[in-house]
Image (cartoon, rainbow, N blue to C red):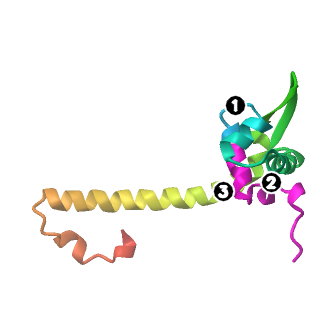
Amino acid sequence: MARAATTTDAFNAVAEPRRREILDLLAVGERSVNDLARLLGLAQPQVSKHLRVLREVGAVAVREGGRQRLYRLNGQALRPIHDWVSKYERTWSARFERLDSVLEELQQEERDGGTGEQGRDRDPSQR
């Protein structure tokens, strides 16, 4: 199966760890490429290449700010990633709710004398 070109898909664009770091830095505000290079410990051309990819998928926008180009996050372009991950968030939430129920049962057993009789006969997967 052919893989989508990196520059056309937000999933591929953020698959690169340095690009995610750039997005994290831009999530708190606009930054110049030199600021990003300094914060990431990378050379300016490397950061520029990553910014180009992020710009092509729409994850960052750029504006002229005097002699600098200032980059900012465009979170809307990351919406497909959020939507995809949201499906799994529901699964995690359901599991955490079941875990909370088990913990409450264990705490109740402990308050009732710690015999643990209530939970022994039950199948753990049914909790």
Q: Callout 2: helix, strand or loop?
A: helix
Visible residue check, residue 93: yes
Relative to 117, residue 44 above or below: above
User: Is 2 a magenta residue?
Assistant: yes
Q: Callout 3: helix, strand or loop?
A: helix
Question: Which badge, 2 or 1, comes first in the chain's sequence?
Answer: 2
Taking 58 as reference, is 81 left or right?
Answer: left
Disc 3 residue type? Answer: Val
Relative to 27, residue 95 above or below: below
Disc 2 residue type? Answer: Ala
Can you tell which quarter of the image residue 87 is in?
bottom right
The spot of residue 99 in percent (x, y) is: 38, 61
Taking 99 as reference, is 17 left or right?
Answer: right
The spot of residue 102 in percent (x, y) is: 32, 62
Disc 1 residue type? Answer: Gly
Q: Callout 1: helix, strand or loop?
A: loop
Residue 80 - label: none
Can you tell which quarter of the image residue 103 is in?
bottom left
Residue 10 - label: 2
Relative to 53, residue 28 above or below: above
Taking 2 as reference, is 32 left or right?
Answer: left
**Span of residues in magenta:** 1-23
In front: 94, or 69?
69
Question: Which badge, 1 or 3, comes first in the chain's sequence?
Answer: 1
In front: 2, or 43?
43
Q: Provide the residue designation for mark 3.
A: 85
Q: Provide the residue designation for mark 1.
A: 29
In front: 67, or 24?
67
